[in-house]
């Protein structure tokens, strides 16, 4: 019994030892790792396309995995998958790639190569006509063991927004001024888009593009986007360029790039709202706004001391710091009112930009308070608008083609420069070219008399005088220019008799002319002849010619001829 017991105990000990050994061996082996999707991504897709390709990439550490892509979220949002194809960037073999519309799932079956992983790139062709723009659309990607949920954006194609980020105030300058437009754009996969920029308003304001090849450039393009075929179309007053997908990565692209235009503003006119209109192949239309600013002689900015200007001139108003629009309220000056702000008479804003050309013709002469306010700071400047008193008047209202058109002008700016222009009476003096131009300065009393040679073409004309510093103008009435008659001279007394050696006073009358020739003697008959040119400098229609008969005889040293009136 004891032996038996002993035998059993030994046997049991052996059995338990074996169990313990097996347990130790089993503990030395770890279970194999579960297969898993290690990465997945989905490219953005452009909406509104009847056919556009989206690429989904999947990596799994399972050899020969069956990859599934649940596209239900895209279908629910309005996309309609049409077809699929797949390739492997590794050494996997693609057995088949199929889209099952019954459960909105793409299935890609692979056979492993040599790397024990599965790497696939799946191109899904969608009809996105009914797809709306959305961010963070999610797919569920699996390999039979685990899943991942890559997201993508459904993006609007084409130009989505434009704004002027630099050069919102295109001021008159001798050197080119660069304007930067920030253009927000979407580009479909493997797509392109021609963008047209209507710049007609800018050209009408006097800005020019001298050389499209160098003056129109693009920078900071989104990854995968290229821009080319830039052209300036003078007849259409447009800029065109092509934006395209240059990546071939199976994804749409969206982002913002800078369109830089170097404008020649040397002949710009003031316009406080100018628009560029962007259109494209996707029927988008976006507008950016800016201003053009002609040079002014007076600039008033926040923080300035009391200022004077002439009533009727355009003045430059400068707001607060760059990037901040300033509201400028104008009040009649009232000594008894708070901050001297009497009745408000006008309000303007520098937006877009920080400057504004203001026509004081809206106000009239007097004292005003200009209040500058950008929402965080306020400042005031007292401005006195003086009367320039510019006037212009014709000396004669009827002249002939061989005469001059004279005018008088005066102003309250002694020594100030002026420009006088002669226009046909029915001309648009703001748009049409003048017939003739003269320039000069007012005298110390602010007065001047100036003239034009009368045009050879008969008709009615008018004179416009511009005060150069302020561009304030004054216009005369009309002068009638008629054809000059045949000029002639006459001796109303017929003949003049004097004793030899005396001075003969010969009266010469002028008709339709102010100059002529008086002939004394006849070389053939008397062997003496004097040809004397006379001019009616005084304008009274006659000249009293003094002829020295003593000098004519060759004796003495006195002058042969003279005139009684020093103006002749």
Image (spheres, helix red, strand yellow):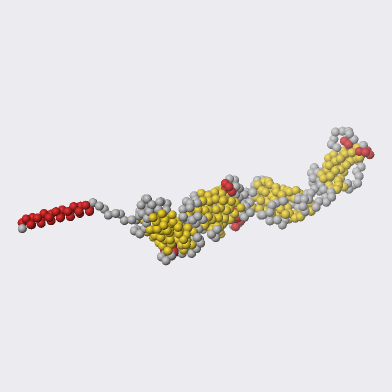
At x 83% / y 40%, what residue is drawn?
562
* Residue 70 percent across, percent down from the top left: 40, 61
At x 63% / y 54%, what residue is drawn?
235
Q: Nearer the viewer, residue 383 or 429?
A: 429
Q: Is residue 157 visible?
A: yes
Q: Nearer the viewer, residue 496 or 532?
A: 532
Q: Classify the position of the C terminus by image quarter.
A: top right
Q: Is residue 355 visible?
A: no
Q: Classify the position of the N terminus by image quarter.
A: bottom left
Task: Name the outermost residue toward the left.
Answer: 2
Q: Nearer the viewer, residue 366 or 112?
A: 112
Left or right: where 373 falls relative to 428: left
At x 84% / y 49%, what residue is drawn?
487
Q: Nearer the viewer, residue 532 or 326?
A: 326
Task: Name the outermost residue toward the right.
Answer: 525
Left or right: where 370 falls relative to 454: left
């Amino acid at each position: 019994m004891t032996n038996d017991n002993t035998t059993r105990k030994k046997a049991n000990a052996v059995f338990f030892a074996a169990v313990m050994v097996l347990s130790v061996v089993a503990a030395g082996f770890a279970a194999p790792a579960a297969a898993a999707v290690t990465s997945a991504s989905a490219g953005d897709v452009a909406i509104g396309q009847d056919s556009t390709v989206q690429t989904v990439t999947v990596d799994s550490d399972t050899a020969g995995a069956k990859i599934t892509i649940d596209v239900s979220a895209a279908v629910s949002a309005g996309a309609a998958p049409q077809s699929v194809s797949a390739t492997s960037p590794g050494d996997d073999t693609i057995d088949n790639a199929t889209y099952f519309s019954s459960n909105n799932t793409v299935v890609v079956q692979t056979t492993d190569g040599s790397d024990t992983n599965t790497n696939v790139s799946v191109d899904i062709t969608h009809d996105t006509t009914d797809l709306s723009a959305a961010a963070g659309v999610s797919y569920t990607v699996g390999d039979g063991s685990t899943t991942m949920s890559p997201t993508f954006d459904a993006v609007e194609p084409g130009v989505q927004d434009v704004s002027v980020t630099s050069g919102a105030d295109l001021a008159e300058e001798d050197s080119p001024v660069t304007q930067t437009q920030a253009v927000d754009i979407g580009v479909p996969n493997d797509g392109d888009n021609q963008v047209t920029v209507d710049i007609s308003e800018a050209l009408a304001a006097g800005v020019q593009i001298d050389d499209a090849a160098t003056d129109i450039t693009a920078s900071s393009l989104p990854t995968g986007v290229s821009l080319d075929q830039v052209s300036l179309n003078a007849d259409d007053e447009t800029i065109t360029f092509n934006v395209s997908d240059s990546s071939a990565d199976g994804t749409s692209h969206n982002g913002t790039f800078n369109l830089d235009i170097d404008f020649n503003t040397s002949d710009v006119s003031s316009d406080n709202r100018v628009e560029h209109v962007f259109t494209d192949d996707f029927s988008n239309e976006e507008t950016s706004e800016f201003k053009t600013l002609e040079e002014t002689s007076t600039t008033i900015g926040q923080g300035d001391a009391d200022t004077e200007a002439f009533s009727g001139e355009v003045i430059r108003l400068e707001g607060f710091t760059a990037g901040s629009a300033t509201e400028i309220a104008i009040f009649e000056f009232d000594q008894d009112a708070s901050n001297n702000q009497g009745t408000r008479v006008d309000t303007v804003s520098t937006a877009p930009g920080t400057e504004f050309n203001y026509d004081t013709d809206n106000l009239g002469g007097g004292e005003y308070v200009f209040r500058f306010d950008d929402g965080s700071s306020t400042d005031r400047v007292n401005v006195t608008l003086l009367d320039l008193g510019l006037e212009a008047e014709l000396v004669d209202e009827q002249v002939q083609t061989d005469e001059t058109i004279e005018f008088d002008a005066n102003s309250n700016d002694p020594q100030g420069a002026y420009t006088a222009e002669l226009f046909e009476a029915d001309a648009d003096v703001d748009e049409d070219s003048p017939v003739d131009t003269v320039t000069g300065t007012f005298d110390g009393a602010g007065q001047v008399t100036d003239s034009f040679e009368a045009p050879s073409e008969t008709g009615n004309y008018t004179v416009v005088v511009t005060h150069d510093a302020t561009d304030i103008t004054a216009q005369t009435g009309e002068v009638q220019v008629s054809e000059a008659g045949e000029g002639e001279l006459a001796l109303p007394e017929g003949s003049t008799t004097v004793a030899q050696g005396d001075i003969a006073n010969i009266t010469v009358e002028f008709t339709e002319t102010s100059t002529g020739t008086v002939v004394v003697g006849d070389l053939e008959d008397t062997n003496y002849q004097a040809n004397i040119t006379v001019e009616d400098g005084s304008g009274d229609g006659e000249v009293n010619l003094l002829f020295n008969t003593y000098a004519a005889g060759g004796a003495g040293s006195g002058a042969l001829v003279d005139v009684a009136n020093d103006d002749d």
